[in-house]
Amino acid sequence: MDLQEQLKKLFPDHIPSKEPETSEEMVHELYIQKEPMICKYEKRNGKPTTIISGYEGEPEDFKLLAKEIKTKFAVGGGIKDGEIVLQGDYREKIMQFLKDKGFKTKRVGG
């Protein structure tokens, strides 16, 4: 007995909908700018940090981009003064990720 048959027995009056349910969120298109985003490395309080700045789009898009980067690379960080500040040195990986998304990047420092 499959799941649909069990559901019919539990809820005989229910009519299933024809629309397929999607658990995926809508893909949001980010603003692709002409100027390169700056990806730099600093040490703050003796710890390595990667800083991404120079995004010209909407602040909501910048927050989405920061969340996507933090999720993809499993790093901590946040947004401060128009910059994404990440814990650790991930310049190469992040620059490649941004290039794959269509952004231009520029490496600064070290």
Image (cartoon, grey):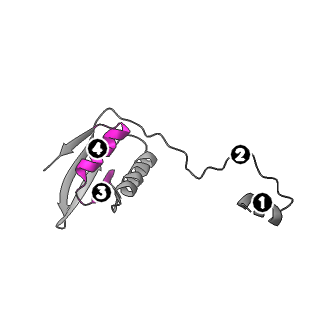
The answer to whether the residue labelled 3 contacts the one labelled 1, judged by CB atoms less than 8 Å apart, is no
- Could you tell me how many numbered marks the image carries? 4
First along the sequence among labels 4 and 3: 3
Q: Residues within 10 Å of mark 2 (few under 14, many from 20)?
A: few
- How far across and how far down the image is residue 15, in percent? 82, 53
* Amino acid type, mark 1: Glu
**Label 1 element class:** helix
The furthest residue to the front: 1
Judge whether 58 appears above or below 67 on screen: above
Per the image, the residue denoted by label 1 is 5
N-terminal of the pair, mark 3 or mark 1, is 1
Does dot 2 land on a helix, a strand or a loop? loop
Above or below — where is 85 with respect to 38? below
For badge 4, the amino acid type reads Gln
Nearer the camera: disc 4 or disc 1? 1
**Label 3 – label 2 distance at C-alpha:** 41 Å
Residue displayed at 55% across by 49% down:
25
Residue 75 at least partly seen: yes
Nearest the eye: 73 or 28: 73
Q: CA distance from mark 2 to mark 4?
A: 38 Å
Q: In this rendering, which labeled residue sits more in front, label 3 or label 1?
A: 1
* Location of residue 34 with respect to 61 vertically, above or below: above
Q: Residue at x 32, y 32 (%)?
A: 34
Q: Can you identify the residue that label 4 sits on?
A: 96
Question: In the structure shown, which secondary structural element does the residue marked by tag 4 occupy?
Answer: helix
Residue range highlighted in magenta: 81-104
Mark 4 / mark 1, whichever is N-terminal: 1
Name the residue carrying label 2.
19
